[in-house]
Image (cartoon, rainbow, N blue to C red):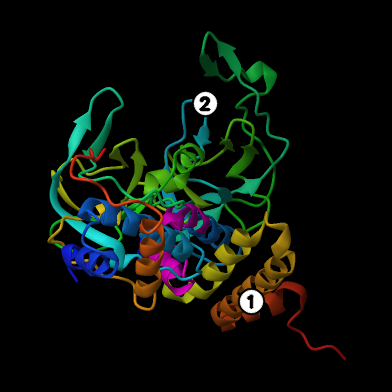
Amino acid sequence: MDIEDVVRFILWTTKRPKSERKRYLELVIWAYRDMCLNHVKDGIKVTKQAPTSINTVPFPDDMEDFVAVGEPVNGKFIPYSRRDDIIITTTVTGSIESLDPSDGEGVDINDQMNGGFSASGGANIYGYYRVDEENRRLFLNKQTRSEVILIYKTSGVKLSETTYVPKKYLKAIINFVLWQDSLGDDNKIGVSTQRQINYNHAIQEIKEREFSIDDLMDEIYRGNQLSPRR
Amino acid sequence: MIKKKIIDGVRNIIGYKYDRRQVSWAIDLAYRQYIYDLMQMKERNYDFLIKEYQNQTVSYDSTKEVHYIDLPAAVVGLPTKEEGVIHINTATGADLDYYPMTIDDLEYSGGLDSSVVETHTGYMVVGNRIEFYNFNSAITKLNLDLAISFDDFDMTDDIVMPGGKDYDIVQAAINMLLQKRPMEKSDKYEQ
């Protein structure tokens, strides 16, 4: 459903005047963004990025939250390991950044572990990164390829083309919009609380519907050993 | 009922010595009061107030860099964002492509995602014209549905007197007129 049709649907079914259209569009965008970032799997983007000359990957403009960076190995995505001790300073001459090895900038981390890439979260010989939040970029270290795979969350809202919202999210979006609409009006404190509860219920319904058997098994394996307890 | 018949109906009650323009003005005052009362109702339907103006030409103001249409008639000053411009449509049909807005909407939403994402056009009444924002410059003509006052309808226009309120409107007009002497032919009618 076109996101602008979602606005039209809400205005009509809640008997709001069409003069509220612009404000409600902003609320619907906010609602969908909140769902994509925090509750549902929509809005996850997987892209190939070429590191810069100083071995960084800038955050894309539509990136709202970082998920993972890695490279393909035998057809599978292998994420890099996060290392917060990677040096992320650069040497600036004029306006050009470079890496000075004497300051530890860009020097390969040399951990002596078993060869190649290991499982997610493990320590590798290859593939490390550190997030430079202030400059909105990743510093890479010892990657093996000229292009890396970057996985991140977007708001789900496309700025240069039509955004389509799954109809299964409509109930949650409407409740979010009505909840936010009643904030700022002291006479509607009770109403806004109820609407927040309605929104949380709608989100819970979505999560229960989207929770698969695989997700359930992952949760079980996360904290349990396969061997029986006696 | 056409406007002339409504006026003549009132003159039939209070006497034909009252000029049509005088009677129209009195009915107009009562009619505006009814519109104001209508505004207080939660669910409002303005459709019966509408007069359609078709194929109005869209112009471009290069100073303000906005597209606009000059109002073909004075609108009733409604205290809502519509301000008397009830609907704007292209010639091919009715939809929500055009919606009323205010300067505040424009200022608050500047730079936000909604200003980038939306494909619809906002309009606001500025002085005696309608200005558009996020306008499709390929469109050169638009149809306007305006809420105009009773006095501004043509004598041959069909006016829908609101059901259940027609008596009140006519009675209010009569009460006003009876407090005034009828216009003499030598009296000038100031527009």
Q: Quadrant of residue A182?
A: bottom right
| Residue range of the region highlighted in magenta in the rendering | A6-27
Secondary element at image label 2: loop
Distance, label 2 to label 1, CA atoms, is 44 Å
- Taking the magenta stretch, the answer to whether it contains residue A21 is yes
Pointer 1: residues within 10 angstroms few (<14), some, or many (20+)?
some
Q: Amino acid at mark 2?
A: Ile
Chain for mark 2?
A: A
- Taking the magenta stretch, the answer to whether it contains residue B63 is no
Number of marks in picture:
2
Measuring from the top left, give residue B113's x and y in whole percent. Answer: 45, 46
Q: Is residue A99 visible?
A: yes
Horizontal side of B4 relative to A132 (left or right) equals left
Chain for mark 1?
A: A
Q: Amino acid at mark 1?
A: Gln
Horizontal side of A34 relative to B171 (left or right) equals right
Q: Residue at x 28, y 70 (%)?
A: B13
Residue under pointer 1:
A204
Q: Residue at x 50, y 36 (%)?
A: A57
